Amino acid sequence: MRDLMRKSLKLLFVWVFFTFPVVRASDTLYIHCLDVGEGDATLIVSPTGGTMLVDGGINGIGDDKVLPFLDNLNLTSLDYIVATHYHADHIGGIDEVVDGLGIDSIGVVYDRGWSYTTQTYQDYSQSVEPKRVTIVDSQMIDLGGGTFVTCMAVNGNNLLEEPFTQPPIDENDLCVALKLEYHGFAFFVAGDLSGKNTANYTDIESSVAPEVGRVEVLRVDHHGSKNNTNQYFVDSLQPKVAIISVGQNPYGHPTEEVIQRLEAVPSVIYQTEDGEGNIVDGDITIKVCSDSFWVNGDSYGMSVGIEGGGGSQATPKEFTLFQSYPNPFNTTTSIRYSVWGDHPHPTTLKVYNLLGQEVKTLVDKEQCEGYYRVLWNGKDNFDQDVSSGIYFYRLQRGDLVQTRKMILLK
Ligand SMILES: [Zn+2]
């Protein structure tokens, strides 16, 4: 695993020195949820022009849809491609995109590693091989302009055991789950991530939900299948907007059960098509700027809910623990958080190991409202170096608690 991380970091460094001509400086982040029928393809363009394509739709969609879409935006390269998992409706079009742009125009292709049995997978793995890197849980990718994408789960989020192959494990359990953060805006996308324990599936959504926390926009898992986007997951993320990527299918996607769970939040639902393949919202573009975001032109405030009706609760921004940076880290990482309230209040920030044992107390004092930044140098309470691995850091202020993950890599 460490070798993979090293490989990944090495490629990242190579990538930093490899610049592309397309740089658009602005303060606007775009997320395009392409209408690819029954499948997924999401294009992220950061304010500084950093690009990430998450999935590429089914076979043929790369040529027919994704490449023309990129062309329309004058994009001739992609910094990152992420394959959430190896089902054809997610990776089918990726080799076409890679071949169309040329492998030299692709920075890094992240996926869950391991392998899969289909011809579609063979085509995918052959085309991306020179740039392919296995993503690591809690790895953070800097897209530029304050846009960070963090891996929240991969290969079952520690609930499953190797080998991560099908059978015995369902491919949906193994999905790469990503959380994008840009200032006060958060977006979650996880392919077909499983949300229910059955004979075939393991509920990964519920294990990820507390780490993800609230989001403005949720890319609904598995095209609105009733076994995904479970109640606990929806209640935890409380998305203001839910986007369902769906097309003609025999499974009844999107299911009434999922629609009802989302409407109860309440989330405003957008969907690319209906289950018969009729266009509903088509391509769905999210534009994020300052303290608002727009979905296909509809305006939403990030702290006051939807503007002009529709109804969505305010999102408390007063108590936030941010992802540490860099992550993974080698010597020192910086942890930011914000706390609010009229009076000074006891606040603690502590680091724990995987066994839940306290490793280091970083903050333990009364703090006033505001933004704070703390550095951790990988040493414990006795000033001894701790070993490489995954650590949790936990912010507590009264009843309010938030926990996140980071990786120390020596
Ligand atoms: Zn799918």
Image (spheres, rainbow, N blue to C red):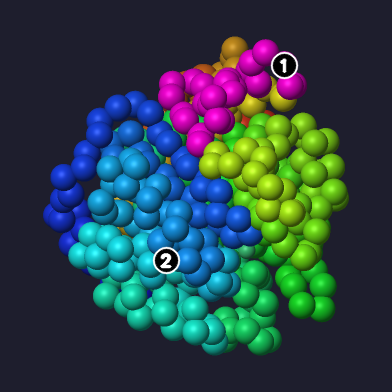
Numbered label tally:
2
Pointer 2 residue: 94
Which residue does the image show at 62% across and 38% down from the upper left?
Answer: 281
Q: Quadrant of residue 183?
A: top left
Which residue range is magenta in the image?
285-311
Q: CA distance from mark 2 to mark 1?
A: 39 Å
Callout 2 amino acid: Ile
Q: N-terminal of the two: label 2 or label 1?
A: 2
Residue 196: in sight, yes or no? yes
Are the residues at dot 2 and dot 1 in contact (C-beta closer than 8 Å)? Answer: no
Q: Nearer the viewer, residue 2 or 92?
A: 92
Query: Residue 54, image x and y in percent?
Result: 46, 56
Which residue does the image show at 55% across and 54% down from the upper left?
Answer: 36
Dot 1: few (<14), some (14–19), or many (≥20) neighbours within 10 Å? few
Q: Viewed as shown, does residue 17 lie left or right of 157?
A: left
Dot 2: few (<14), some (14–19), or many (≥20) neighbours within 10 Å? many
In magenta stretch: residue 38: no
Which residue does the image show at 49% across and 84% down from the upper left?
Answer: 119
Q: Nearer the viewer, residue 213 or 121?
A: 121
Callout 1 amino acid: Gly
Q: Is residue 66 above or below residue 155?
A: above
